[in-house]
Amino acid sequence: MDPIKYIEISLCRVPLRHAVSDAKVLTGRQKPLSHVDMLTAEIETVNGEKGFGFSYSLRAGANAMLAHAKDIAGELIGEDPDDIGRLWEKMAWLGASVARTGVAVQTIAAFDVALWDLKAKRAGKSIGKLLGAFRNDVPCYNTSGGYLNASLDEVIKNVERSLGRGLGGIKLKVGQPDLKKDIERVRTVRQHVGEGIPMMVDANQQWDYTTALRAGRQLDDFGLVWLEEPLSAYDYEGHAKLSERLVTPIATGEMLSSVAECSELVKQRSVTFMQADVPRVGGITPFLKISTLSDLARLKLAPHFVMEIHIHLGCAYPHEAWVEHIEWLEPAFNERLVIKDGRMLLPDRPGLGFSLSEQAQGWREGIQRI
Ligand SMILES: [Mg+2]
């Protein structure tokens, strides 16, 4: 055994080039998003082998994650980093009184990803190959060009840039207070790109059931791959009813932060596309349980954000899997994902395949070596 000797944690604040707004901003619930806070974890063994992982928060919550990480990191020292399942449970039980969901498990995700990175590096394989890949690339779509802060002209330019870069699909944000504006935006982009380009829309939970049904019936005309987060993230039953009544497949799950919550989407047949997010559900270990539940129900997979992690899980999923291309974290890493003919390629570098850039080192704060 080569036990864990040191753990280094930090926050890394990654600025966005332009602040972005989805429907939550237009309905007055949030301010535009200007940066992503990453919680980073580096695990080093007695023999000097290293694993790197990260989790993230948007707007608030990062300091709570760093504080919780400090609370639990010491308990990993001296442990065998190969025992990822047992260590996940150990970390979860340490924080069990403040929940097995939310901030507590999102903190664990940084350690869990670092443990998988280390294990895959030792095997000399990417995490996707270590997990058992079904394919070496997955279709990917752009989200960052379709935010509501962009005018329709800007969106069209962004769409052309994305398709020119080889991305395989386009997602537009909807959920504005005026539904007519949403429909007009989707119609214009659909006419511009033609029928052959996969398109998705995302309402970011801003509709009630009646509005979602009314919107969904109009959106059914556009041949969309999915309609994302039409309702509150916890309205499992409402999503199931929409799934029955609309032709367009329903996608949700990005806001859920446990296996238990995601399993409700499966049990209640709420979705066609499961959108769980590795950092939000507590890491790769719990995500694999969600993958298994989703596989049994023959769901499709479309994990939310952090393409740097989700490329591995998308390639290791038995059925259709889309990866969301959001380039926000690119400046934080030395490496880039390769996109070709509408698909994102599984990196052949060992482990996660990403390391913090020089620039990101300068964005780090709260560095603690435990
Ligand atoms: Mg979304």
Image (cartoon, helix red, strand yellow):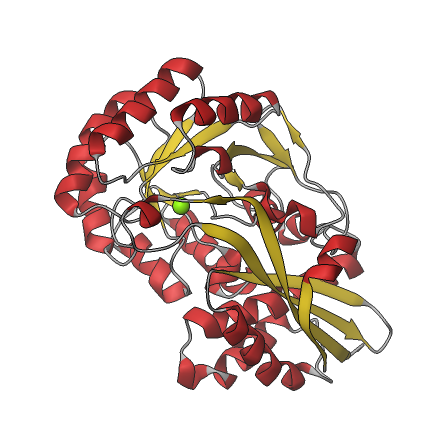
Which residue is drawn at the image coordinates 64% and 86% (left, top)? 75
Q: Position of residue 46 (x, y in %)?
A: 84, 78
Quadrant of the image containing the C terminus: bottom right
Q: Is residue 41 above or below residue 133?
A: below
Instruction: Give the left or right position of residue 208, taking residue 34 as reference.
Output: left
Q: Quadrant of residue 26?
A: top left
Where residue 231 appears, x then y in whole percent?
24, 49
Looking at the picture, tell me which residue is in the foreground, 343 or 57: 57
For image coordinates 41% across by 64% down, the residue present is: 259
Task: Give the residue at the far right of this rendering.
Answer: 47
Residue placed most toward the observer, 341 or 357: 357
Q: Is residue 119 visible?
A: no
Relative side of 352 to 218, left or right: right
Quadrant of residue 341 within the rendered picture: top right
Question: Is the N terminus in the top left, top right, bottom left or bottom right quadrant?
Answer: bottom right
Image quarter for ligand 1 equals: top left
Above or below, comparing residue 46 to residue 341 in the picture: below
For residue 224, side relative to residue 104 (left or right): left
Q: Name the residue at 72% across, 76% down.
A: 7
Residue at image coords 67%, 53%:
127
**204 horizontally vs 2: left or right:** left
Q: 191 above or below 262? A: above
**Total number of numbered labels?**
0
Question: Residue 96 at what x, y percent from top left?
Answer: 44, 83
